[in-house]
Amino acid sequence: MNLSKAPAIRSEIKVVTMLRGLASSFVFLFHLINVSNGYVGNEMMRSIAFYGQFGVQFFFVISGFVITYSMINSGFRTKNYFTFLKKRVVRIEPPYLLVLILTVIFIWIRVKSGLGHGDLPMPGWKQIVLHIGYLIPFSSYDWLSIVFWTLAIEFQFYLFFPLIFVIFVRREIFRWITSACLVVFFFLSHSRAHFFYWSPVFLLGINLALYKKNKIGSTELWIIFGLLNIFIFYKLGITIGIFSIIPFLLILFEPGLKISILNFLGRISYSLYLLHTLVAFAIINLGIRYETHGLQKIFFIILAVSLTLFSSYLLYFYVEKPCQKWASAIRYKS
């Protein structure tokens, strides 16, 4: 691949779908094996699955890339800010709100029935309402699901980036000044619940999209790539640095991979991400309660994986996919 010139402009980067599938699978396996009340006790499996949590960094790089790429494709202007937010809300909010409702119902059933393993208090109305606006990080409450925290990061990104998008793309000096400011905020931020804490990871995807759309050259791309990774490795550590570099390089070089299962998981990745802890943990809790020997444990694990994938597909097909179409039908006014 000749990196002195970006490839021809296209509307889709196919490897991104597979990366989404890979990322959602990583996170799913991490939660299933490492965050299931010790149900899976094999230390080798737990050691390997431990790295699945870093699939979140895959998602952050992908989001920076996809949002920027699509904004350029659609001709976004600053005056389209609220239309952009409308598109994002229509795209992501209905599946999220449905899973939030299901989560509250599940907690209520557990509290009232005494089923399950471990204590789980019934949430109040204020805690539930704060979930709707992704405001939990700015309160004293906890998320009702351990996966919701990343959605708040993404939404903060949606609120911030469109405000600077046009001048960021068009003006090199402003791009560097803004990037420098984000790095300063990155080092000042101490909360992983805020966008600025992860801003260099998003910037990797953002600048990669600019290169793919012929907005910056390869020299600028590699300079910013090197600088951002220095900052990421220094503050966030080697592992997060590596898991940020991998999706960057795979999207950049676009290996001709065609893995059907990853394409499928990529299409349902958002639904899978939202649902996997709710469904899988419910099954695992039943396993903890009723399983008496090893074969039953294997059965409950297979059941947890199968029902999670099945329910995720249903959520994708009946809720997420229609929302994708509705969001795509919303056009920016010229």
Image: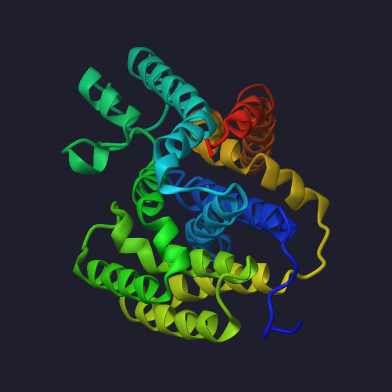
The residue that appears at 36% across and 43% down in the rendered structure is 152
Direction from residue 246 to residue 114 in the image, left or right: left
- Position of 16 relative to 117 (above/below): below
Count the marks.
0
Residue 112 in percent (x, y) is at 34, 12
Residue 326, visible in the rendered structure: yes
Q: Residue drawn 55% across and 87% down?
A: 219
Q: Is residue 258 above or below residue 214?
A: above
Residue 33 in percent (x, y) is at 53, 51
The residue under the point 55% across, 75% down is 216
Query: Residue 96 placed where, x, y %?
Result: 47, 30
Residue at 74% x, 84% y: name it: 2
- Quadrant where the C terminus sits is top right
* Along the viewing direction, whichever of 52 and 222 lies nearer the viewer: 222
Drawn side of residue 288 relative to residue 297, left or right: left
Q: Is residue 46 visible?
A: no
Res. 247 image quadrant: bottom right
Residue extending farthest to the left is 140
